[in-house]
Amino acid sequence: MSDKIPLFFECCRPVKGISQGAVFDLQRERYISVPNDLIDIITLGGKKTVSDTIQDFDEDDRSTYQDYLEYLYKLEYIFFVDSDQLNWYPPMNMDWDHPSEITNAILEFDTNSKHDLDKIFKGLEDVGCLALEIRIYDEFELDYLAEILDCAANTGITSIALKYNYFPGLSSEKIISSTEKKYFNLHSIEVYGAKKEEISTVSQRVKVLLHEDQLLSSTHCGFISKESFILNKTFFLESMNFNSCLNRKVVVDVKGQVKNCPAMTEIFGSHHEVSLQNVARESAFQAKWAITKDEVIVCKSCEFRYVCLDCRAFQANPAEGQLHGKPIKCNYDPLSGEWL
């Protein structure tokens, strides 16, 4: 392999941070951390052969470089080609687009909510919404949930996540047994504030998650951790080009107000009075969609910036009128490469 040139597979995307880099395998949904210098050597080294590249190193660095190449090759992150084969492997198109005007939505409910469900779901259908998150903050009856899910069943929504605060009157087991076989777009249920023994997580199809020490609210968002990384091509490309949380998102809060995010204060009218499609087409509503992690303080120097969800609602040291502060609920320090 010494006379060949190493190349990353196009689905294995290297990203440099301020202190280290990472290579993300978007096909197998995994990643490894690597030195920034290694990324530069492979991607910016003038497409040199291994033997030519080694000439630039001292003896110790040569061994390290060869070890890394062997490691990446065994993981199938890189492959080797002859110099006359470079044109055989064109770069991947890094653009992102989607035919839907809105791809994802959040609907919030409490005991005082007076939503026009028919109007809301008609609006979501008009914009081509595919993913829906239902948040219910107060106690509710099973019939109430069924009414919401029935409306969603008559749309093109393919994925529904239900989130609610635990209360003794309605067990997750009852919810699963009454919804699992009827609503095939319900894919997950998250229960907040319950003890493990109070929650049934047995389901053939619906994923059930328990958050024992947390309560769900409109400000419950923006938590960033390794466990929340999304390691697929679609999310990676969207994050490179748009905001990874707010892009193509619409929210109807507990009061029926249309927003970008439940925790944000800017309101674009009541869903009773405005059309979701018209709101989605407003330049002011779309403005936050364009804020990428490459523009966010600290995040722009982080190797994980294209695989984590962003948060513009809660920022560290936000400047007046600016939306480019680091998410305050992220505890990763790119400079040290450590989770604090």
Image: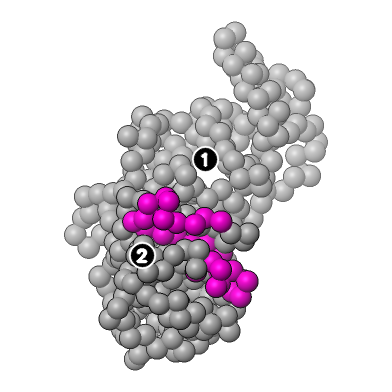
Name the residue at 45% across, 42% down. Answer: 226
Residue 63: horizontal and vertical position, in percent? 62, 13
The structure's colour scheme is: one colour
Residue 117: horizontal and vertical position, in percent? 43, 86
| Front-most of residues 20 and 43 | 20
User: What is the CA distance from the residue labelled 2 to the residue labelled 1?
Assistant: 47 Å
| Front-most of residues 322 and 31 | 31
Residue 116 visible in the snapshot: yes
Residue labelled with disc 2: 168
Total label count?
A: 2
The image quadrant that residue 115 belongs to is bottom left
Check the image and report above or below for 337 versus 220.
above
Residue 93: horizontal and vertical position, in percent? 64, 55
| Front-most of residues 29 and 111 | 111
Whether 189 is among the magenta residues is yes
Name the residue at 47% across, 54% down. Answer: 209
Q: Amino acid at mark 2?
A: Pro
Span shown in magenta:
175-202
Name the residue at 49% across, 79% down. Answer: 146
> What label sits on residue 15 in the rendered view?
1
Check the image and report above or below for 119 versus 313.
below
Instruction: Please state if 288 lies on the left or on the right of 37 as rendered.
Output: left
Q: Amino acid at mark 1?
A: Val
Q: Residue pushed farthest left?
A: 320
Residue 281 visible in the snapshot: no
Assign the C terminus to one quadrant of the image. top left
Q: Nearer the viewer, mark 2 or mark 1?
A: 2
Name the residue at 52% across, 32% down. Answer: 33
Instruction: Please state if 190 lies on the left or on the right of 322 as rendered.
Output: right
